[in-house]
Image (tube, helix red, strand yellow):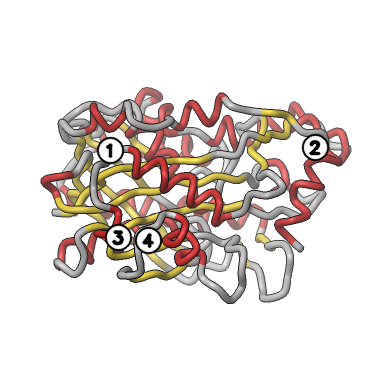
Amino acid sequence: MAGIIAWGAYIPKYRIKAETIAEVQNDDATAIKAGLGLTEKSVPGKDEDTATIAVHAARDALKRTKINRKEIGAVYVGSESHPYAVKPTASIVGEALDIGNSYMAADTEFACKAGTATIQMNAGLVNSGMIKYGLSIGADTSQAEPGNALEYSAAAGGAAFIIGPDKEAVALLEHTCSFSSDTPDFWRRAQEPYPSHAGRFTGEPAYFKHVSSATKMILEKSKLAITDFKYVVFHMPNGKFPLRVGKQFGVTKEQIEQGLVVTKIGNTYSGSSILGLASVLDVAKPNDRILVISYGSGSGSDAFVFRVTEKITAAQKSARKVSDYIARKEYLGYAQYLKHMEGIHS
């Protein structure tokens, strides 16, 4: 049984408040915050992109384990804002981490669930015996056209997980499954700088159908009930959607609030649900069960059941926590914000 050996996170220190954007866009900031369930978002530095975020998160993951990094046999980076259209991010990460040359490397892209897909890939490789350890990363510097509603939530950040054998795991992967369909609620054609979305269509037939279907599927497969989980993490496009789907399944505030990082940093896309998972691992105790349901537009959801082991306690003290990155912040004005985002689209 494969599991998470170590985890790491990274969130840029820069923030922009909803009020700052609303003032420029002539919007009602109070209504925006109430409607989206968030107050501000993270913004990448001028010299930060998906690759640098991925490397930061992976370095924190390596601090939490004593494995020989040269034994990492696969590096997969999920994102929808890879710095190059043709050139892998994964090999940049592998080189920066000095893991040698004997590893498989690939980038994945499935909107906001590209990161969770890499966890499934590496778990399969570990379980098959093809590799000893695999590095799974989800990171984004997500794009939003100025004036679009997405500008209030599209954020930057990511998380990294080292997947390995059960005897070394801080959290065992007990079950996983996926629910997929061709539901085009969000897209970006080649050469277009910003994504397009289908408004309210992104809710009912897209997010809610896939997240609820994947949740039902994993509960049936695992023969577990929602009450068996100490923590529940749903993909977080905003602060309202995960609470609504949670209510459908009877998820309590105590189960969901630790992973609900969107309210403080916005939607980090491929980093969203897995930053929630990282935040939960920061505080989890042995034998806690964690339910994670990602979502990626286009559309699909990956579902996971993790069970925390006694190795979690020592690992929690070895690197920065998600809360540390959330607390570290510097606010930008709107003109500064645009300057920071220029590099992402150039």
Q: Is residue 67 left or right of residue 207?
A: left
Dot 4 lies on which element? helix
Nearest the camera: 209 or 344? 344
| Residue 279: percent from left, percent from top | 40, 33
The image quarter containing residue 131 is bottom left
| Residue 199: percent from left, percent from top | 67, 55
Residue where numbered disc 3 is placed: 120
State if disc 4 and disc 3 touch (CB < 8 Å). yes
Dot 1 lies on which element? strand
The residue located at (48%, 27%) in the rendering is 323
Classed neighbour count for the residue bearing mark 4: other residues with Cα under 10 Å, few (<14), some (14–19), many (≥20)? many
N-terminal label among 1 and 4: 4
**Quadrant housing the C terminus:** bottom right
N-terminal label among 2 and 4: 2
The residue located at (21%, 31%) in the rendering is 288
Q: Amino acid at mark 2?
A: Ile
Q: Is residue 37 left or right of residue 106?
A: right
> What number of labels is visible?
4
N-terminal label among 1 and 2: 2
Residue where numbered disc 2 is placed: 21
Q: Is residue 147 visible?
A: yes
Q: Amino acid at mark 3?
A: Gln
Estimate the spatial distance between the alpha carbons at disc 3 and disc 4, rounded to whole Å.
5 Å
Mark nearest the camera among 3 and 1 is: 3
Q: Is residue 177 visible?
A: no
Which numbered disc covers residue 117?
Answer: 4
N-terminal label among 3 and 1: 3
State if disc 1 and disc 3 touch (CB < 8 Å). no
Which numbered disc covers residue 290?
Answer: 1
Estimate the spatial distance between the alpha carbons at disc 2 and disc 4, rounded to whole Å.
33 Å
